[in-house]
Amino acid sequence: MIEVENLVKRFGNLTALKGISFKVKRGETFAFLGPNGAGKTTTIHILTTLLKPTSGRAVVAGYDVVKEEKEVRKMIGIVFQDPSLDRDLTAYENMLIHAGVYGIKNPRIDEMLKPVELWDIRNKVVRFFSGGMQRRLEIARALLHEPEVLFLDEPTLGLDP
Ligand SMILES: Nc1ncnc2c1ncn2[C@@H]1O[C@H](COP(=O)(O)OP(=O)(O)O)[C@@H](O)[C@H]1O
Ligand SMILES: [Mg+2]
């Protein structure tokens, strides 16, 4: 499902990724750990097509992240390290916008919000949500278009065990 080969990323004279390689099979949960600045976010940005590698190769769900970025984007969901919700909109509206961006005609917003216990407060503006509630909404949103691969950057941030 994911194949990374000798991925290198340089920012000026700083080498953030020094040639990493790994493979993840379909159905597998794969976690990579490392101290601050280890290059975890940089790796996720390359695999989600937001950043170009300096060298090396990565394939996600059968598509090359550099040559086939549009196809890759259709296959993936992402929860960013930093919050990316629209805080002036309700939980439900945040989900609706995401459905619109992905062209989902009948989004199953209830199915996504119920398991993360946000359905009852779906019409509340996100700015009044706690950090954990916002995080749960981001996860529900990332799953709405049923991605083949889900990327979570610092997935436990703000969540109860
Ligand atoms: N856009 C950028 N420009 C310059 N340096 C960057 C940029 N993004 C990340 N870095 C540097 O790359 C290294 C890896 O950062 P990052 O991938 O965010 O690490 P992690 O997510 O593991 O904490 C750090 O030294 C960071 O300062
Ligand atoms: Mg990071």
Image (cartoon, rainbow, N blue to C red):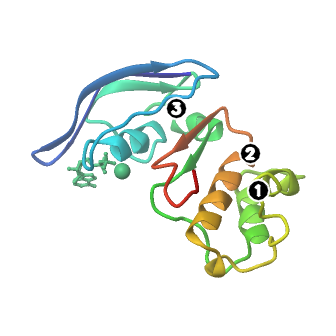
Q: Position of residue 37 (x, y in %)?
A: 24, 48
The residue pinned by badge 1 equals: 99
Nearest the viewer among 32 and 48 is 32
Q: Position of residue 153 (x, y in %)?
A: 47, 48
Where disc 3 sits, the SS reads loop
The residue pinned by badge 2 equals: 145
The residue pinned by badge 3 equals: 68
The residue shown at (45%, 49%) is: 154
The residue shown at (46%, 33%) is: 31
Q: Earlier in the sequence, mark 1 or mark 2?
A: 1
Res 49 visible? yes
Q: Are marks 1 and 2 in contact (CB under 8 Å)?
A: yes
Amino acid type at image mark 2: His
Q: On screen, 131 above or below 16?
A: below
Asked whether, in this view, residue 93 is left or right of residue 153, the answer is: right
- C-alpha distance separating marks 1 and 2: 7 Å
Circle 3 or circle 1, nearest the eye:
1
